[in-house]
Image (cartoon, rainbow, N blue to C red):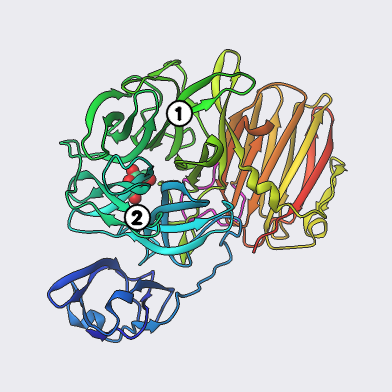
């Protein structure tokens, strides 16, 4: 099929129930784009989009691996704008592109007042495929503007996860302040590549001498690059099988293997992915410790993907875990993966973002035009409890600014049902709840969030076992995967006062307990928003001393 490009965007009609077929776009003899996609004729679920600006006025040829017939009757539209697709589960507080598949956050970097979020992206379908880096920017970590693809597949392969740095001193020679992206080029082997931006992260050029690092290992990916001030060197951490490899470099192009970390450490139920390495302050002290973040799939505490971390020392060559016998989880839900932090964040902040899904069912969750969002941003620090140092995960302070000033704090009665729509004067399904519960002599204290269809999420503290549980087995649509209806449990410290913050955003619940000493992130798919709440206490009584449900000021 030939198309003369007359508009900025080509819209490809996608039928999600069809067979995935390789489709290529040629400019003369040169293949300029290749995508695996299920094109629709009678039935169209949504439009995948391809930005064709640089080919305006040109004639392009579109071919499929199934021949000409496959494309007969496929109406590829030419449009001035991107399509706006919507869906009832689409979050408001969390970023999603208008269409397409999203997984890991990539290349998080703060440049000149702007937070850049790149992410694993398939613009042509809502299943994992055609990996490129999508790009969005924000100045407040909440409102995101989507910019389409930043780095697209090439002869070395598709573009897997990685990171960005700002090369302030021009160590790589691309220019002062170049933003440099490191990613894995994935084909039948995985190699590391780089690309650089001379316009503050808006556009990238691939380095002419890619790849910059190769290996004989099959799983060799997700480069995280940081600057190590003490040794004045760049450090790259790579996930390699079930280990991390640590490299150093003076110029970001030539890398030397310094050490390996992982054998006998932490959870090993699956492959290690998406590392991060950062130094964090310990609250209440002047001290800092190094944290090695290690995402793991499968092998999480409730099956599938999860984020573990190690606390210890790092001297520019070697990371030493101070507690090899303890496995530490950053989040106790099922939908918190590929966590990484922003490079160059202001005021030395460690701002983390996770992908809110799980490889057990990520491709099956019941959304159509988009699939998957990232978590709310979270600030990380360290705290010590009974001699052990843990990561504290607090919703980023930017989220406080969204709270509607009219929201009222109140005391709640146990055993009564409250209507959240009325308290909120809103039924959008996006809100924050903050509560403090004081226990008198109960064994279990909990509440259900539910809707008129009887769909509910139950959360409760077990005071004897010192746990917090979230049960989503009756949360709405759960049948798309046997691994979805789950009950997740976090350890909590003792004490009679419990503080909890919940972010509910149509199809997700993120819980933060006791100022971030535990976090739990779970997806839910209710057929209508949870708009009621009722508390209960078993084996004794308690007081809900304060309860506020906040409407969030979102555009
Ligand atoms: C983690 C991951 C990474 C890889 C990317 C591919 O979710 O498997 O290891 O780079 O996703 O999309």
Q: Are marks 2 and 1 in contact (CB under 8 Å)?
A: no
What residue range appears in magenta? 473-487
* The C terminus lies in quadrant: bottom right
Where in the figure is residue 295, as x and y percent of width and height? 41, 36
Label located before the other in sequence (2 or 1): 2
* 328 falls in the magenta region: no
Residue behind mark 2: 198
Q: Quadrant of residue 13?
A: bottom left
At horizontal 56% and vertical 62% (from top left) the residue drawn is: 90
Where in the figure is residue 129, as x and y percent of width and height? 31, 58
Q: Residues within 10 Å of mark 2 (few under 14, many from 20)?
A: some
Q: Residues within 10 Å of mark 1 (few under 14, many from 20)?
A: many
Q: Main secondary structure of the magenta part?
A: loop
Looking at the image, which is closer to me, 408 or 252? 252
Residue behind mark 1: 309
* 486 falls in the magenta region: yes
Can the viewer see residue 20 in this picture?
Answer: no
Looking at the image, which is closer to me, 531 or 202? 202
At horizontal 27% and vertical 23% (from top left) the residue drawn is: 259
Q: State the count of labels.
A: 2
């Amino acid at each position: 099929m030939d198309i003369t490009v007359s508009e900025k965007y080509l819209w490809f009609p996608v039928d999600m129930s069809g067979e995935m077929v390789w489709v290529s776009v040629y400019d003369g003899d040169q293949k300029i784009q290749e995508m695996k996609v299920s094109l629709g004729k009678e039935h169209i679920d949504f439009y995948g989009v391809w930005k064709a600006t640089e080919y305006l006025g040109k004639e392009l040829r579109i071919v499929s691996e199934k021949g000409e017939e496959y494309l007969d009757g496929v109406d590829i539209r030419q449009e001035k704008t991107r399509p706006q697709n919507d869906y009832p589960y689409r979050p408001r507080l969390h970023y999603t592109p208008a269409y397409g598949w999203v997984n890991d956050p990539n290349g998080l970097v703060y440049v000149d007042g702007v937070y850049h979020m790149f992410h694993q992206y398939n613009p042509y379908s809502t299943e994992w495929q055609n990996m490129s880096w999508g790009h969005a920017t924000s100045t407040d970590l909440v409102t995101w503007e989507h910019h389409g693809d930043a780095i697209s597949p090439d002869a070395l392969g598709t573009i897997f996860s990685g990171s960005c740095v700002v090369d302030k001193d021009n160590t790589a020679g691309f220019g002062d302040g170049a933003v440099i992206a490191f990613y894995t080029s994935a084909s039948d082997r995985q190699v590391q590549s780089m690309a650089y931006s001379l316009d503050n992260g808006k556009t990238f050029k691939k380095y002419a001498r890619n790849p910059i690092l190769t290996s004989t290992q099959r799983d060799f990916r997700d480069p995280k690059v940081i600057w190590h001030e003490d040794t004045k060197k760049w450090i790259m951490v790579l996930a390699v099988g079930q280990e991390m490899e640590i490299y150093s470099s003076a110029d970001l192009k030539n890398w030397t293997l310094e050490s390996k970390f992982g054998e006998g450490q932490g959870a090993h139920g699956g492959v290690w992915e998406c590392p991060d390495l950062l130094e964090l302050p310990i609250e209440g002290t002047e001290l800092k410790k190094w944290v090695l973040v290690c995402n793991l799939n499968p092998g999480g505490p409730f099956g599938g993907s999860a984020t573990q971390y190690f606390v210890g020392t790092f001297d520019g060559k070697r990371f030493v875990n101070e507690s090899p016998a303890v496995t530490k989880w950053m989040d106790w839900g099922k939908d918190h993966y590929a966590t990484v932090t922003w490079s160059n964040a202001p005021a030395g902040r460690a701002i983390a973002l996770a992908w809110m899904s799980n490889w057990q069912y990520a491709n099956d969750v019941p959304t159509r035009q988009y699939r998957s969002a990232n978590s709310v941003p979270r600030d990380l620090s360290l705290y010590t409890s009974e001699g052990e140092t843990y990561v504290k995960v607090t919703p980023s302070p930017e989220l406080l600014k969204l709270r509607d000033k009219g929201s009222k704090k109140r005391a709640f009665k146990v055993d009564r049902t409250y209507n959240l729509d009325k308290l909120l004067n809103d039924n959008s399904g996006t809100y924050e709840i903050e509560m403090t519960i004081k226990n008198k002599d109960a064994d279990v204290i909990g509440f259900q969030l539910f809707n008129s269809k009887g769909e509910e999420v139950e959360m409760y503290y077990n005071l004897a076992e010192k746990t917090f549980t979230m049960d989503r087995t009756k949360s709405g649509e759960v049948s798309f995967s046997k691994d979805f209806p789950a009950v997740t449990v976090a350890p909590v410290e003792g004490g009679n006062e419990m503080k909890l913050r919940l972010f509910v955003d149509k199809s997700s619940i993120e819980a933060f307990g006791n100022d971030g000493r535990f976090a739990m992130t779970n997806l839910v798919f209710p057929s209508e928003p949870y708009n009621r709440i009722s508390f209960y206490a078993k084996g004794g009584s308690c007081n809900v001393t304060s309860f506020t449900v906040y409407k969030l000021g979102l555009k």
